[in-house]
Amino acid sequence: MRLQGKVALITGTGSGIGRATALRFAAEGAQIVAVDIADSNEGTVAEVQRAGGEAIAVHADVSDDADVAAAFGRAEDVYGGLDVAFNNAGIMLDDDTDAIATGEETIDRTFGVNIKGVLYGCRHAVEAMRRHGGGSIINTASFVASVGAATPQIAYTASKGAVLALTRELAVVHARENIRVNALSPGPLQTEMLMSFLDTPEKKQRRLVHVPMGRFGEADEMASAALFLASDDSSYMTGANLQVDGGLTAAYVTPE
Ligand code: NAD
């Protein structure tokens, strides 16, 4: 029960990493504010409750500051404060390719969710945590923030680099307020987001050859890392980028 008595707001809980983390945090004793734009979020909350956990669903678009403010307001109204914010919702659009072909609307939408969404989440988390004596903020970046790919998604990659930069700066600014801010950088995962994009065995293999462990990661493995960053187990960590990627960002030549 590493999050016993803690209140955790998580975005992107309708599927993938967010869903897995909501279930894990609740099992560790946290009260969950589950935030998503998709109806599947209600299903995640029902799952948490069936498992004996405590959660509410909040419908919000993280790229809209008023929506984000309202979501954090619910955490304080319903559960009396905020201890953990996991700014995890993100998008990767099909027509996001290289710098020449990627259109302005795709760039704006990607930056809106992946950068502004995280920044708004941090803003309201800091305000709520100040009122509550501190807390832990976790922002989902990606391995593509650290290594380039010849299969580009330039807006997505740029947005994840921004997540790392804003995480570092916020960590330094708020370090003496008992507010920690860290990034979690997943490797390629077996989630809806990536599998719908890598929809042939050839496309999957093109990626797997670069992963020393030779497999995609699981959402549950990201939930374990997020739990570490959320809990006091990581009490002396702030401004870090926790790379949970099967060795991908450490690799040059991978095993046969
Ligand atoms: P996913 O698509 O399974 O889940 C993302 C969730 O975010 C969905 O439920 C979606 O409805 C929600 N969402 C999207 N836009 C939103 C908005 N504007 N407001 C509120 N909610 C919104 O994806 P996932 O794989 O669980 O990804 C979670 C995070 O991990 C993302 O930030 C993603 O970029 C990052 N990531 C994923 C991978 C991967 O391989 N899947 C790798 C590295 C990083």
Image (cartoon, rainbow, N blue to C red):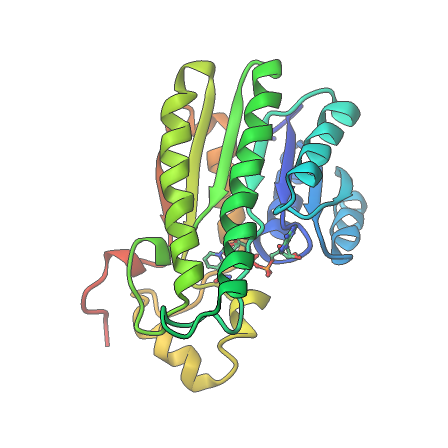
* Quarter of the figure that contains the C terminus: bottom left
Residue at 40% of width from left, 20% of height from top?
A: 175
* Quarter of the figure that contains the N terminus: top right
- Residue 2 place in picture, x, y as percent: 57, 30
- Residue 216 place in picture, x, y as percent: 44, 66
**Does residue 67 appear in this view?**
yes
Asked whether, in this view, residue 148 is left or right of residue 132, the answer is left
Figure quadrant, ligand 1: bottom right
Looking at the picture, does residue 74 appear above or below residue 41?
above
Residue at 63% of width from left, 50% of height from top?
A: 12
Looking at the image, the residue that sits furthest to the left is: 253
- Residue 64 place in picture, x, y as percent: 65, 44
Count up the numbered dots: 0
Please tell me which residue lies in front, 142 or 104: 104
Residue at 42% of width from left, 72% of height from top?
A: 97
**Does residue 2 appear in this view?**
no
Looking at the picture, does residue 253 appear above or below residue 157?
below
The answer to which image quadrant residue 237 occupies is top left
- Residue 128 place in picture, x, y as percent: 62, 22
Please tell me which residue lies in front, 4 or 209: 209
Asked whether, in this view, residue 10 is left or right of residue 147, the answer is right
Looking at the picture, does residue 74 appear above or below residue 221?
above
Looking at the picture, does residue 4 appear above or below residue 20?
above
Residue at 31% of width from left, 61% of height from top?
A: 248
